[in-house]
């Protein structure tokens, strides 16, 4: 069913949008109350973090037109930046014309790191740990019995030598834990976390076996914590965009396609550009991550560490000439998210966001999030390459400036229009226009 296509949704009032969702997704009264502003009570907030004095609201919009692996999604997006939701929805429509997004996800494997310091013989320690792989995995599983019952659990152990015991460390670089003739290891415990993001779970596992690992290595345990560079839990998403879906009044589909490919190449060659290219991806990724109550700092950290995995910062997505001359986009990134645990179920707004998405599992949600990232990226590149992003941004920026100047209701649009027409979107100009209208 094409539930994610809601023509003229942007023209409806907020109340009419709620009504539309009631019919389309079967929302109940409580859901609608949550949408109408009851998402997070002070009591709930007070139980979530420390020193609470209030709650902080951000707009929640819907990304429309998304089709991922032949399934339609209405995507909740929480973001303060104008145009992100419209841009993603618009790009998703173009991608839909090419069959939608095709995505796949790795098994939900998180990495827990156990640092071992003052290891007298790093080679022998590595061998000692790996030769006890089976019993160590059993010990890991004993720390997370309910996850094991759900089909998850420890899957593998890897040992990485960070400082070999044979290293000659200059005295000026002395670091406690790597004395002369002592080395440092990082032991990776790979844990299948099912639908949880898994930070607390894998931290528990690391705590449980750190002592035993240190004893096997003849060293001491150091840090025990997950890695946000979750490169065993990646998602890959691909799309094909037909030329007719790219063409604008001014530009042919071929020209837009080539502009996007050239912009992608720029990012592949230059980390300065890649950072902004990836910011465009994260516009979509973060908005859904935040809406669903996930730890977006973890997703951000993982994305950028992965982008720099070979020592150079690279774009997370690339755009190329696809079959038959269409535009082809591909994105790959780690996806440290869950649909249970953390605040995903404790925050009523996050719970409702997951409901709007059809209550997906973590892997499915990861594929949707990555698709929204690729859509946001396409939209930015398309605008940048062909029209200059400034024009589109200006009119949205003008609305913010109009509101800052004190305009409300219909006056926002009127002041913003005048600012855009003047090509002078400054606050003092907005104040003057507003004063003139209201005089
Ligand atoms: P939780 O500690 O909430 O653990 C997940 C919970 O989900 C468990 O209680 C588990 O139950 C339950 N669960 C129910 N159904 C399932 C299922 N199908 N699959 C898996 N678990 C299920 O959260 P996480 O371990 O996921 O940790 C996430 C939190 O950790 C976030 O709040 C994050 O901000 C925070 N964090 C992040 C760090 C980072 O570096 N990014 C560092 C430290 C914390 P049961 O107990 O019965 O197995």
Image (cartoon, rainbow, N blue to C red):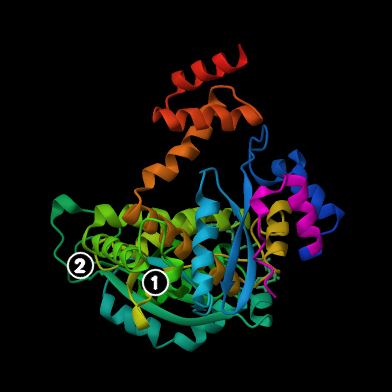
Position of residue 155 measured from the top left corner of the image (x, y, whole percent): 51, 83
Disc marking residue 181: 2
Q: Which of 188 and 241 lies nearest the eye of the viewer?
A: 241
Task: Examine the rendered structure and indicate whether residue 399 appears above or below residue 323.
Answer: above
Residue 138 in the magenta stretch? The answer is no
Task: Examine the rendered structure and indicate whether residue 323 appears above or below residue 276.
Answer: below
Q: How would you rate the neighbour count of disc 1 (Cα within 10 Å): few for under 14, some for 14-19, many for 20 or more?
A: many
Position of residue 383 measured from the top left corner of the image (x, y, whole percent): 39, 54
User: Which stretch is magenta?
Assistant: 1-23
Name the residue furthest top.
439
Image quarter (top left, top right, bottom left or bottom right) of the C terminus: top right
Disc marking residue 329: 1
Q: Residue 116 is drawn in which quadrant?
A: bottom left
Q: How would you rate the neighbour count of disc 2 (Cα within 10 Å): few for under 14, some for 14-19, many for 20 or more?
A: some
Instruction: Say what secondary structure mark 2 lies in.
Output: loop
Q: Residue 331 is drawn in which quadrant?
A: bottom left
């Amino acid at each position: 069913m094409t539930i994610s296509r809601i023509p003229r949704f942007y023209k409806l009032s907020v109340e009419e949008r709620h009504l539309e969702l009631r019919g389309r997704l079967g929302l109940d009264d409580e859901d609608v109350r949550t949408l109408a502003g009851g998402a997070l009570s002070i009591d709930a907030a007070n139980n979530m973090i420390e020193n609470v004095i209030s709650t902080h609201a951000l707009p929640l919009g819907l990304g429309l037109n998304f089709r991922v692996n032949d399934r339609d999604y209405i995507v909740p997006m929480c973001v303060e930046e104008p145009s992100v939701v419209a841009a993603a929805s618009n790009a998703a429509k173009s991608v839909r014309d090419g069959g939608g997004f095709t995505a796949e996800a790795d098994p939900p494997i998180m990495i827990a790191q156990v640092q071992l310091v003052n290891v007298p013989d790093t080679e022998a320690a590595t061998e000692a740990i790996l030769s006890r792989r089976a019993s160590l995995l059993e010990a890991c599983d004993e720390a997370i019995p309910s996850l094991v019952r759900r089909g998850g659990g420890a899957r593998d152990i890897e040992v990485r030598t960070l400082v070999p015991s044979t290293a000659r460390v200059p005295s000026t670089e002395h670091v406690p834990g790597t004395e002369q003739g002592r080395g440092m290891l990082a032991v990776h415990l790979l844990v299948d976390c099912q639908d949880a993001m898994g930070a607390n779970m894998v931290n528990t596992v690391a705590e449980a076996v750190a002592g035993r690992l240190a004893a096997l290595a003849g060293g001491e345990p150091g840090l025990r914590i997950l890695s946000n560079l979750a490169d065993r839990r990646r998602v890959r998403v691909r799309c094909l965009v037909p030329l007719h879906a790219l063409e604008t009044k001014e530009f042919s589909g071929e020209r837009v396609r080539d502009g996007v490919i050239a912009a992608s190449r720029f990012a592949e060659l230059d980390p300065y550009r890649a950072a902004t290219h990836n910011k465009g991806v994260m516009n979509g990724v973060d908005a859904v991550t935040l809406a669903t109550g996930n730890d977006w700092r973890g997703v951000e950290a993982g994305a950028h560490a992965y982008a720099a995995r070979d020592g150079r910062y690279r774009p997370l997505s690339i755009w190329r000439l696809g079959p038959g001359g269409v535009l082809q986009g591909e994105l790959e990134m780690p996806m440290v998210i869950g649909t249970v645990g953390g605040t995903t179920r404790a925050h009523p707004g996050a719970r409702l966001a997951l409901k709007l998405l059809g209550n997906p599992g973590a892997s499915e949600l990861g594929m949707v999030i990555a698709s929204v990232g690729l859509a946001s990226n396409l939209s930015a590149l398309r605008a940048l390459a062909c029209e200059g992003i400034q024009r589109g941004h200006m009119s949205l920026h003008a609305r913010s400036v109009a509101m800052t100047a004190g305009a409300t209701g219909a006056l926002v649009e009127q002041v913003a229009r005048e600012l855009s027409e003047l090509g002078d979107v400054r606050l003092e100009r907005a104040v003057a226009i507003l004063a003139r209208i209201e005089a």
